[in-house]
Image: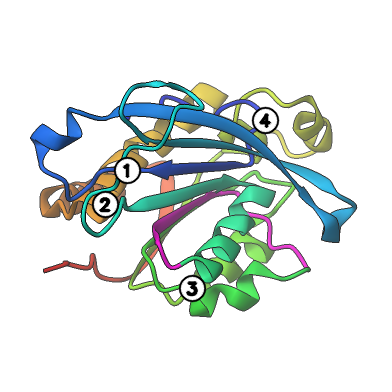
Amino acid sequence: MRVEKVPSGCSLLAVALVGGVAASAIASYGIGHVSVTFDDPDRVDRPVPAEIFYPADEPGEGVPVAPAPAGGFPAVVIGHAFGGGATILAAHAESTIRAIVNLAAQNGPRPSPANLADEVTVPALVFAASHDCVTPPASHQLPIYENLGSSWKTYVCLTGGSHCKFSGPDPDCHAAESGRRTPTVSAAQQQAAVLDLLLPWLAAVLKDDQAAGEEIQRRLEATSDISFLQAGALPVRR
């Protein structure tokens, strides 16, 4: 599956991938897709839009999920803002999630993702932006990262990036940022920086690709417009 940008207005992106499956089998899968909006009763029934992509016998909207191989399909949950915090809650509640990625995650109060993060042990990639004035890293992404119990966790702060530029055009988000700290990178630059790190990271954790694990380390150390923290090691499944 190729992800070129986060869909506009999407809070959660759930992807079931076919890492660990033989290449010949991977080629036989299409990509199914469904859009779902959940309501959060603890937050005045706030809508949580989600885009779900999954292996299917043929590509299309709402097509049936393909029969899973032995061991099932490894899944990763990716979320932005409120959806970023929800990735922690999802991994805390659902054992089939193989990894989580969050973008400018919100450390909300009910329940606080940071308070549950120590019980999340799957690999985690936490993105933040230095000019985020909606969910500032110091009070949102850093507490989540620091509390994560992940076997391998990485925190990446994009210099000059902002909260809203992680996703597509969203008038409400941009209104919240208006008149506050001005980002120094474009949305295209910020999203390209995310994908440059995200794609090899996904290959490493979902396909047990050690070369991809080495590549993500090389990119982290060679990229001048980020700062990062890291703990643990890429798990190797036998």
Q: Residues within 10 Å of mark 3 (few under 14, many from 20)?
A: many
Residue 167 in percent (x, y) is at 59, 32
Residue at the spot x=70%, y=70% of the render? 112
Q: Earlier in the sequence, mark 2 or mark 4?
A: 4
Q: Is label 1 in contact with label 3 (beta carbons under 8 Å)?
A: no
Span of residues in magenta? 95-109
Is 147 left, or right, of 133 in this rendering?
left
Q: Amino acid at mark 2?
A: Leu
Numbered badge on residue 148: 3
Looking at the rendered structure, the secondary structure element under dot 3 is loop
To which residue does mark 4 refer?
9
Q: Earlier in the sequence, mark 1 or mark 4?
A: 4
Seen in the picture, residue 204 relative to 138 is either above or below; the reply is above
To which residue does mark 1 refer?
17
CA gap, disc 2 and disc 3 = 19 Å
Q: Earlier in the sequence, mark 2 or mark 3?
A: 3
Residue 21 in percent (x, y) is at 16, 46
The residue mark sitting in front, 4 or 3, is 4
Q: Amino acid at mark 3?
A: Leu
Q: Residues within 10 Å of mark 1 (few under 14, many from 20)?
A: many
Residue 228 visible in the snapshot:
no
Q: Earlier in the sequence, mark 2 or mark 1?
A: 1
Seen in the picture, residue 89 relative to 59 is either above or below; the reply is below
Residue at the spot x=43%, y=33% of the render? 64
Q: Amino acid at mark 4?
A: Gly
CA gap, disc 1 and disc 3 = 23 Å
Q: Residues within 10 Å of mark 4 (few under 14, many from 20)?
A: some
Q: Residues within 10 Å of mark 2 (few under 14, many from 20)?
A: many
Residue 15 in percent (x, y) is at 42, 42
To which residue does mark 2 refer?
206
Q: Quadrant of residue 205?
A: bottom left
